[in-house]
Amino acid sequence: MKIRRREKKDMKTYSITDIGRRRTMNQDYVYASEQPVGNLKNLLIVADGMGGHNAGDLASRYTVELMVEYITNEKDEKRPVSLLSSAIHHANELVMEKARSAKEYEGMGTTIVAATVTDGCLYVANVGDSRLYLIDQGIEQITRDHSLVEEMIRMGEIQRKDAKSHPDRNVITRAVGVHVPVRVDFFDVKLEKGDKLLLCSDGLTNMVEDEDILQLVKKSASLKEAAERLVTEANKNGGKDNISVVLAEYE
């Protein structure tokens, strides 16, 4: 008799998305799989949609579904960065087609932050201003926002402390579903056992300071408790946008 051993998971995860206190619709979409997706050992995604009444909701959900489907069906490519890149470019083209198919979809698009962990290395892809943080004893933003205020900070036009109150803080400079080709940034980080990953939409980071995020995560007994406390804090501070959180711990 042949015994198949289950492959040890690299991490445990918890995900949550919340409409917030001001919006009438949740245009965020989250995905978290501890199990293999195609040739990836695991997959985490947060998408924050934009557009008209239904367009933003469709853009985020459709993009994530297209990415997961592409990665699941791609049998030849095994390199994590290449898989994430190809999946995002594939989704970008089909979202643009969908946007051209009906007037109510005009102008729709979405941010994407996607990550996978294999052999102790974190691989990240991002477009837009959804973020990935590495949390150990401190908190470090791994991704770089593709936003107007981030450009202004880099140019020395405003201070980082003023970014959250700037009138153009929600203007992003890159999105999936807007241009072909889409420009994607990639990052890789070596992980240590116990490191935590936070993928989130700006509905969290515009409402909760990084240091407060760190303390809430460190003081929580589980990923579920931490994620729920982060959403509660964002809503307590105003909940001006949809709030999405994917938390993972490398084991």
Image (cartoon, helix red, strand yellow):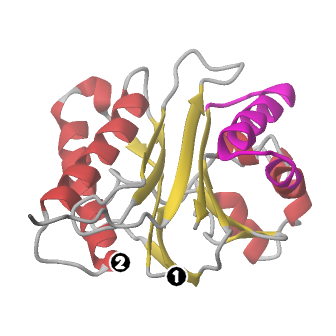
Q: Residue at x 27, y 71 (%)?
A: 83
- Write the start and end of the magenta stretch as one range: 215-242
Camera-nearest residue between 223 and 237 = 223
Q: Residue at x 54, y 50 (%)?
A: 13
Camera-nearest residue between 184 and 247 = 247
Dot 2 and dot 1 residues touching (CB under 8 Å): yes
Does the magenta portion include 110?
Answer: no
Location of mark 1 (residue): 188
Residue 221 on image: x %, y %: 78, 45
Location of mark 2 (residue): 81
| 141 sits left or right of 55 in the view | right
Does the magenta portion include 229?
Answer: yes
Q: Residue at x 81, y 51 (%)?
A: 213
Three-letter code, disc 2: Val
Secondary structure category for the residue under label 2? helix
What whole-number distance in Å separates the C-alpha atoms at marks 2 and 1?
Answer: 9 Å
Residue 144 on image: x %, y %: 62, 70
Q: Residue at x 19, y 50 (%)?
A: 69
Judged by its main secondary structure, the magenta piece is: helix
